[in-house]
Each structure stands twice: as C-alpha cells, then as structure tokens.
Image (tube, rainbow, N blue to C red):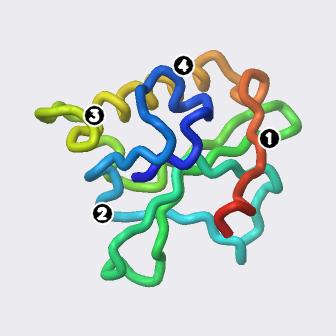
C-alpha cells in the first residue's frame, strides 16, 4: 500500500510519510476507484497502490473515503482484505513492518466514526481526478 496523502486525517500520528510503502498490506482481494461507475463527487483517495498484474485487470488498489453532504455520514474503504492481517505483530519497523501504521490508522478511523458523523469533523475533499 502506498500512502498518497500522508496529511489526511487517517494517517495523523501514524508516522507514515508521504509515499510510504506499507509492504504486505495489499493482499488477496483489491478495490480500485472506478470512474465508469456512479460515485459521489467528493471521493478522496488516501492511498493509491500498484498491484501485481496477475490479480486481473485492476492495476491499482485504492483506499477511499467520502462523506455525505446530508447528515455528514462517512464511508471508508481500505481497498484490500489484507488490512486486518496487517494489524498483527511483526518484527522490525517501516518499511518492512506495516503493523504500527495500520494500527494507528485503524484507531483514527474508529475514533472518528465513533464520534460521528465523520463529515462533521473531516469532510472528504475530492482528489480522485489526480489518479484517474
């Protein structure tokens, strides 16, 4: 997973710099922002990561976030089923071990969504056009 916006709220206090490569997080199944599908206009891409071509036609995986203007609810997708396993303990530090960053980001997500609505505190800012 490549951090494409280290200044975004999920990465606050995580220690992940811009462009950090969190090895092993993108694993198994991947999600990518798809411009051919209807989407809210304010989708924010938080990570944009190349994936191995053998996984099919998707060549990038994206962590995305958007908020609803009415009510302020937030929707966040990590972009991979490898997120939960990446929270587990491992030896070493970045770039080899992503668990501290993934745990910090998860804590930020849970705090924001627990305080809710997410859009009240961190409304999404569209940036998907930078990538697609």
Instruction: Tell me which residue sits at (35%, 56%) in the image.
Output: 26
Q: Position of residue 93 (x, y in %)?
A: 22, 32
Residue beneath the point at 41% across and 27% down: 15
Viewer-side label of 3, 4: 3
The residue identified by callout 1 is 68
- Please, what secondary structure does the residue beneath circle 3 have? helix
Return the residue nearer the eye: 6 or 36: 6
| Residue located at (21% from left, 43% from top) | 96
Q: Is residue 76 left or right of residue 80?
A: right
* SS category of the residue bearing label 4: helix
In the image, which is nearer the foreground, mark 1 or mark 3? Answer: 3
Q: Which residue position is annotated with label 2?
A: 28
> How would you rate the neighbour count of disc 4 (Cα within 10 Å): few for under 14, some for 14-19, many for 20 or more?
few
Q: CA distance from mark 1 to mark 3?
A: 30 Å
Lower position in the chain sequence, tag 1 or tag 3: 1
* Residue extending farthest top: 115
Q: Determine the CA span between mark 2 and mark 1.
A: 29 Å
Identify residue for label 4: 111
Mark nearer the viewer, 3 or 2: 3
Q: Position of residue 51 (x, y in %)?
A: 38, 69
> Residue 62: x, y in percent?
53, 57
Q: Do labels 1 and 3 touch, CB within 8 Å?
A: no
């Amino acid at each position: 997973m490549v951090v494409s916006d280290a200044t975004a709220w999920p990465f606050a206090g995580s220690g992940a710099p811009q462009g950090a490569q969190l090895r092993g997080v993108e694993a198994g199944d991947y999600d990518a922002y798809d411009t051919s599908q209807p989407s809210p206009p304010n989708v924010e891409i938080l990570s944009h990561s190349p994936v191995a071509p053998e996984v099919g036609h998707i060549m990038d995986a994206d962590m995305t976030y958007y908020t609803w203007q009415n009510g302020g609810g937030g929707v966040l997708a990590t972009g991979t089923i490898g997120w939960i396993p990446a929270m587990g303990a491992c030896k070493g530090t970045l770039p080899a071990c992503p668990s501290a960053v993934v745990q910090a980001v998860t804590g930020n997500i849970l705090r924001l969504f627990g305080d809710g609505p997410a859009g009240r505190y961190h409304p999404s800012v569209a940036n998907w056009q930078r990538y697609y």
